[in-house]
């Protein structure tokens, strides 16, 4: 990704050398935002369209300096009957770096408080979807870093208003093409409006061809006219919504707690069932969990999804802290040592060819890494400066506290079976007695979901993972960052440094000296001389069971039927069990996956625009394996 270059024209206006055009009217960017985009979509005054709405969604085609967003956010704050939830999606091919954005915003002091919050949440410049929450989640900004003509078709949602803002059609014709206008029409909610500063003939014709009725209005500044419009074409069916006032979740590990918190934030009443006597009692109860993104040579779906999930997880930690629920963590950086010379070459190539920013990842030699880690490392590798570790118990407690009174926890309550009823789903205990009944249920209890008849066909494998606890006072040197290779070692927390982890196809929960020894061998391969300082038999640790899908991606979404006829052409068309959802398969990256997967599932259930595009949302759809099986049999018949 190529960031925007900070430059100014001769009159001091922000200017793009790449497109040869200014970012906003020379008469004032903030005034333009209010006159052209807010007023143009009838969002100001006593008769504003969003007054009294439960939710309102806006899509902007060019984020630029972010002035339209900041002006909209301010207008939302000033509106006494503002919508309860504001979704603002914005596409940007060349986003500004955080420091450059902050410098540009210095010219708009009245926006300083909001701009500062935007700067604090600004993501690393990684392609894809980045969801940011403000106002305790009432205002959600979803930034999409990529070209409008490419990413608009990937957006999943319906929008009430469009801000068509970009460089002049003569400078950037792709953004104003018929294809872009048709993509906007596909995303338009009934009665959606649009506004833009340009009245170029081709733009008007393309919008009309896509189903928008447009008209000219008096322009702003030196522009004689501007354009407003309304979608009058055929409405595309909206995504299904589900009853979400009362929801049950099975499993009070990180997957279930994250889902419960995201739903409670939307006003849902959530009942959380846990068979153990406390939250985060099983795999989610490890002493430390590593937060680390995945990279791949070809930017696979797994790596692209994991990268945006990692950044979202970091923002959620910040948001929890800002709301009074700080989490014990150490975002001290992670150094991932190359396995061998060939792997080191691959690591360097990935960083160089994918243009990943330094605040996300760097390739470092061993000597440089030693200064960051605090100990000699076994080779070169990736340095992730914002990665680190989190204390699972602390995060679990923060999520429970953040959910507040809308979350009811039912510990020591095992759900043995489900029964479909006229009201949705009934949860039964081992004696067949009802525990709860309601329309919407989420299965978030790891591999345990396959013990329920409705989910027995889910392809979840169970892998044992043993961590080893090293006493902090016995470490050869103070460790300043997480190191990993085939295993990992985290800096000490509460007197213990977590070393991990085994990965075996097993359900055995008893710790073994053999796996402690294997972890020590992993330590020796990362930090020369460290592994020999410890004896396996003298160490303690913990075993957890990880739910893993065949493709290592989560299983997240509406639960599919095990089979169907006729065979659908796409897995999104696979029939589902109504009101029954799954959140599992997080494997060894549960604390990276859980926050974004919970936000995705809550958005699906509540009928909101999704935090991921169609492609990556489909990549975690639990119906993908059933559909692939059908595809394989169809191909065999051809």
Image (cartoon, helix red, strand yellow):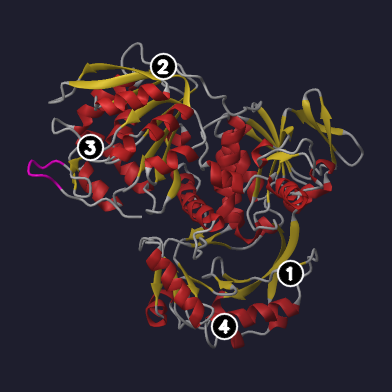
- Going from N to C along the chain, the mark reached first, 1 or 3, is 3
Callout 3: few (<14), some (14-19), or many (20+) C-alpha neighbours within 10 Å?
A: few
Residue 18: image location, x then y, percent: 22, 49
> Could you tell me which secondary element the residue under label 1 belongs to?
strand
Q: Which residue matches tag 2? A: 51
Q: Is residue 352 left or right of residue 71?
A: right
Secondary structure character of the magenta stretch overall: loop
- Going from N to C along the chain, the mark reached first, 3 or 4, is 3
Asked if the residue at tag 2 contacts the one at tag 4, i.e. Cβ–Cβ closer than 8 Å, the answer is no
The single residue placed furthest to the right in the displayed view is: 431
Residue 132 visible at all: no
Q: Which residues are magenta?
A: 8-13
Which of the labelled discs sits on residue 504, or is there none?
A: 1
> Could you tell me which secondary element the residue under label 3 belongs to?
loop
- Going from N to C along the chain, the mark reached first, 4 or 2, is 2
Q: Which residue matches tag 3? A: 170
- Going from N to C along the chain, the mark reached first, 2 or 3, is 2
Asked if the residue at tag 3 contacts the one at tag 1, i.e. Cβ–Cβ closer than 8 Å, the answer is no
Q: Is residue 592 left or right of residue 414?
A: left
């Amino acid at each position: 990704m190529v960031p925007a270059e900070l430059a100014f024209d001769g009159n001091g206006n922000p200017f793009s050398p790449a497109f040869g055009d200014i970012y906003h009217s020379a008469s004032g960017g903030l005034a333009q935002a209010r006159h052209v985009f807010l007023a143009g979509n009838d969002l100001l005054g006593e008769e504003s369209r969003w007054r009294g709405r439960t939710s309102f969604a806006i899509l902007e085609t060019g984020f630029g300096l972010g002035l339209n967003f900041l002006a909209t956010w301010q207008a939302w704050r000033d509106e006494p009957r503002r919508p309860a939830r504001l979704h603002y999606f914005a596409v940007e091919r060349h986003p500004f770096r955080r420091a450059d954005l902050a410098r540009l915003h210095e010219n708009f002091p009245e926006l300083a408080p909001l701009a500062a919050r935007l700067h604090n949440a600004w993501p690393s410049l990684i392609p894809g979807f980045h969801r940011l929450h403000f106002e305790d989640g009432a205002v959600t900004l979803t930034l999409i870093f990529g070209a409008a003509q490419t990413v608009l078709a990937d957006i999943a949602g319906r929008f009430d208003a469009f801000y068509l803002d970009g460089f002049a059609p003569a400078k950037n014709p792709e953004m104003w093409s018929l294809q872009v206008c048709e993509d906007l029409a596909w995303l338009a909610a009934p009665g959606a409006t649009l506004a833009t500063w340009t009245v170029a003939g081709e733009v008007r014709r393309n919008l009309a061809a896509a189903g928008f009725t447009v008209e000219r209005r008096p322009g702003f500044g030196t522009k004689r006219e501007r354009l407003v419009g309304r979608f009058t074409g055929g409405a595309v069916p909206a995504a299904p919504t589900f009853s979400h006032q009362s929801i049950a979740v099975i499993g009070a590990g990180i997957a279930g707690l994250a889902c419960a918190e995201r739903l409670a934030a939307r006003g849902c009443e959530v009942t959380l069932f846990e068979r153990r006597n406390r939250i985060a009692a099983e795999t989610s109860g490890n002493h430390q969990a590593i937060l680390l993104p995945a990279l791949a040579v070809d930017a696979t779906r797994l790596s692209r999804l994991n990268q945006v999930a990692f950044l979202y997880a970091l923002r959620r930690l910040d948001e929890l802290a800002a709301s009074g629920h700080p989490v014990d963590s150490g975002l001290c950086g992670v150094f991932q040592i190359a396995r061998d010379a060939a792997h080191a070459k691959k690591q360097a190539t990935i960083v160089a060819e994918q243009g990943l920013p330094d605040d996300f990842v760097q390739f470092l030699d061993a000597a440089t890494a030693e200064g960051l880690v605090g100990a000699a490392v076994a080779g070169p590798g990736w340095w992730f400066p914002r990665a680190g570790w989190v204390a699972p118990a602390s995060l679990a407690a923060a999520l429970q506290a953040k959910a507040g009174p809308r979350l009811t926890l039912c510990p020591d309550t095992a759900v043995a079976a489900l029964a479909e009823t006229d009201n949705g789903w009934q949860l039964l205990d081992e004696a067949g007695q009802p525990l709860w009944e309601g329309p919407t249920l989420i299965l978030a209890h790891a591999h345990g979901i396959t013990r329920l008849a409705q989910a027995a066909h889910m392809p979840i494998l169970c892998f044992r993972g043993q961590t080893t606890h090293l006493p902090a006072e016995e470490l050869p040197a103070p460790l300043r960052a997480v190191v990993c290779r085939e295993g990992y070692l985290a800096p000490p927390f509460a007197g213990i440094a977590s070393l991990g982890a085994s990965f075996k196809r097993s359900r055995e929960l008893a710790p073994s000296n053999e796996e402690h020894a294997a972890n020590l061998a992993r330590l020796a391969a990362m930090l020369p001389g460290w592994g020999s300082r410890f004896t396996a038999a003298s160490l303690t640790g913990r075993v957890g069971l990880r739910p893993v899908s065949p493709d290592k991606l989560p299983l997240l979404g509406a639960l599919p039927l095990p089979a169907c006829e006729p065979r659908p052409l796409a897995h999104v068309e696979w029939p589902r069990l109504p009101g029954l959802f799954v959140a599992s398969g997080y494997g060894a990256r549960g604390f990276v996956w859980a926050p974004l997967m919970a936000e995705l599932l809550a958005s699906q259930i509540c009928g909101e625009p999704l935090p991921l595009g169609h492609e990556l949302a489909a990549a975690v759809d639990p119906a993908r394996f059933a559909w692939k099986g059908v595809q394989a049999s169809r191909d065999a018949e051809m």
